[in-house]
Amino acid sequence: MTQLTLYNTRTRTKEVFTPIDPANVRAYLCGPTVYDRAHIGNARNVVIFDILIRLLRRLYPKVTYVRNITDIDDKINARAKERGLPIEQVTEGPIRWYHEDMGALYTLPPDIEPRATEHLPEIIDIIERLIANGHAYVADGHVLFSVASDPDYGKFSGRTPDELIAGARVDVAPYKRDAGDFVLWKPSTPDLPGWDSPWGRGRPGWHIECSAMSWKLLGPDFDIHGGGDDLIFPHHENEIAQSCCAFPGSHFAKVWVHNRMLLVNGEKMSKSLGNFKVLHDVLETAPGEAVRLLLMRSHYRSTLDFSDAGLIEAKAELDRFYRALALFPDLEPSKEIHESVFDAICDDLNTPSAISVLHMLATSALHGVRQSAAELLSAGRFLGLFNATPEEWFRGGIDQSAIDDLIMQRVEARKRKDFAESDRLRDEIAKHGVIIEDGPGGTYKLRKA
């Protein structure tokens, strides 16, 4: 059996993955803060984690995949205040858009998608544990984590005390014992969202939310935690500190998988540079499968340069693959994934190597070898590709009869108030390249993804 190896940010080495419980591999991915549409950088870690989850489900009998939604955040509060709306109405649209956009990239939905607003009891519980353990203190209506109380603080990110303070960009408030102490709970003025707590009406800090949700759903120790490398500090450093200090003897996540951020046309993505790529806008110009392939073409730990030219190349690669598949009507995928593709993904998710094997199989299939076409189909589907038939792909990827059937199923599900099934069908419709937008009274509109 091929062994899975992953680069672990915690140990800074590539190591063989050994689950805590082989009967249930538990994985957590930091999800979106829902105040606006996702950008193309947000999509990279979801696609990479999607490939990891697909692989884990081939290797183990059960995988519990959790991806959170951060729906308590000061950026959300600012939007709510600006628009005169409760935060629930501000976050409703971005959550729906996020599901649609990630569905259009053919990423698997998480098994559980917790929201911070649903986990205030767990957040308060952890804070109380930290106070009781001497790792947190109350000051001026705030509760803060004391970094000096944790001798391991800073080891994960490898930063010195001075670098920790500079990197955190923290407000050196007079009530802090140490400049690097970070907020676990803060007071809310009457015009801001707030929840009752032992320390008065207020709201949690960002870092404590993920610790509470992962603890509730995966336990104090679990297998894999993922996210972009921009989260290593302060977010993940702080998650580790508060979780391990709240639950003495625990190690929180065993393996940390971080993807590098991406560039756009050779430069860091920035609104000021005019190269900020909203994922929805990208999907308006290219098939979701082409965007997915482009995000896979560079290894997740290397910098990816996202460009229009790269997107055209990814689409051309898919055209070639689909031409190879089109030569064999009624083609069934091979029962086994091609060994070289499987081995590549087991080797720290080496997607560029796996894609090179797809090209080798396509070349053979284009020369008339049916078995190669079957192996190409099987390997591509394992990687989240080939979600259309060749006929659908070359006419735009839309199978209208299949979409119509799914839409009718969803209408019936909404009539039954089976919203979980309705959400699943919405994501399934998005995989066909169509976004369904709900309106009042059960009405809806369709648009191409």
Image (tube, grey):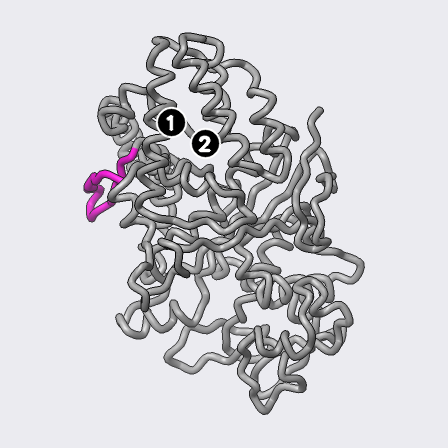
Residue picked out by circle 2 = 384
Residue picked out by circle 1 = 387
Res. 416 visible in picture: no
Residue placed at 53% from the left, 49% from the top? 302
Asked if residue 33 is positioned above or below residue 303 in the image, the reply reads below
- Does the segment drawn in magenta span residue 128? no
Q: Which residues are magenta?
A: 433-449
Mark 1 touches mark 2? (CB < 8 Å): yes
Residue placed at 62% from the left, 84% from the top? 179
- Give SS at disc 1: loop
Residue placed at 60% from the left, 76% from the top? 182
Front position in the image: 284 or 239? 284
Q: CA distance from mark 1 to mark 2?
A: 7 Å
Report which quarter residue 212 is drawn in. bottom right
Q: Amino acid at mark 1?
A: Asn
Asked if residue 161 is positioned above or below residue 444 in the image, the reply reads below
Residue placed at 33% from the left, 67% from the top? 86
Whole-percent x, y for residue 174 in the image:
58, 91
Res. 291 visible in picture: yes
- Give SS at disc 2: loop
